[in-house]
Image (spheres, rainbow, N blue to C red):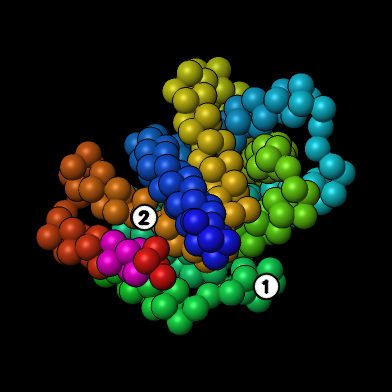
Amino acid sequence: MNRLEAGAYEYGCIVLGATLLALGAAILHASWNIAIKQSGDRWLALWAQMTIAGVLCSIFIVASGGVPHEAWLWASLSGITHVGYVWFLARAYDLGDFSVTYPIARGNGAVLAALGGVVFLNDHLSIVNVLGIAIAAGGLFLLAGPADNKHVLAALCVSLTIGIYSTVDSHGSRVTGGNLYPLTIFMTGTFFISLHGLAMGRAQEMKHTLRTRWKPLTVTACASVLTYWMVLLAVQRASVGYVTAIRESSVVLAALFGWKVLKEGNARRRITAAGVVLLGLIILVVS
């Protein structure tokens, strides 16, 4: 094997690793989101999940000797953004179907994250990359279909927060150069979201939720930590737009879960749209 072939092989392995990490994250992410959708009070469930994750992450960070000081700046910016993410996500799930809200939020989030990577992080996307992302995004909108304005607005607000924190966290992960950075996000997210909950006067409800539902929420908390860690490991190996688009294959699972688990309608349209999403992802991966 000559040097050129060896370089191509090494690059292929790196991209394959990033792809597998992103796909694994997609499966976990869709799974814990449907658990949240099935919860009674979605904001409380999301807050408790983040809090449990934050406690687990703080223990691990202390045991590992800590993280660079500069990591906390980016993690704090991400934590503040997660206040909006959690509020709008809970609101969107309150207003409509899982298989509608999730695709709109994640699909637009992928596009915004890709643009953020190009504008702020000097990522480069080829014409074929852009074509793949465009086709996948078109499939996501077809999958979402018609929805009421409040539902769409809440999901679009979720996507905006996703685009912001994805760009912030990708940069934070790169500049700190450590695999512990994702854990700091859950700690700062816990802090700022808890402040928001206290400001809303929900202290007693927050205590009750942790006391009565800590077991199932610990499972989803672990899944959420692993999901985000896998994504940020992937963006250390490939561009933000590439990783984010692959990870958004979770919308296909969302369509299937919504149809089979939650008994949501429009199965034919959603399956067709899922095929369009897969086509876009295949084009993206091949390129």
- The residue range painted magenta reads 278-283
Q: Which residue is mark 2?
A: 249
Instruction: Label 2, secondary structure: give it.
Output: loop
Q: Residue at x 50, y 61 (%)?
A: 5
Say if 102 sits above or below 145 in the image: above
Q: Main secondary structure of the magenta part?
A: helix
Q: Residue at x 37, y 51 (%)?
A: 250
Q: Position of residue 68 (x, y in %)?
A: 84, 42
Q: Residue at x 54, y 43 (%)?
A: 230
Residue 236 included in the magenta stretch of the image: no
Say if 274 sits above or below 219 in the image: below
Q: Which residue is mark 1?
A: 122
Q: Position of residue 279 (x, y in %)?
A: 28, 67
Residue 203 lies in what quarter of the image? Answer: top right
Q: What type is the residue that disc 2 sits on?
A: Ser
Q: Position of residue 81 (x, y in %)?
A: 66, 55
Residue 150 lies in what quarter of the image? Answer: bottom left
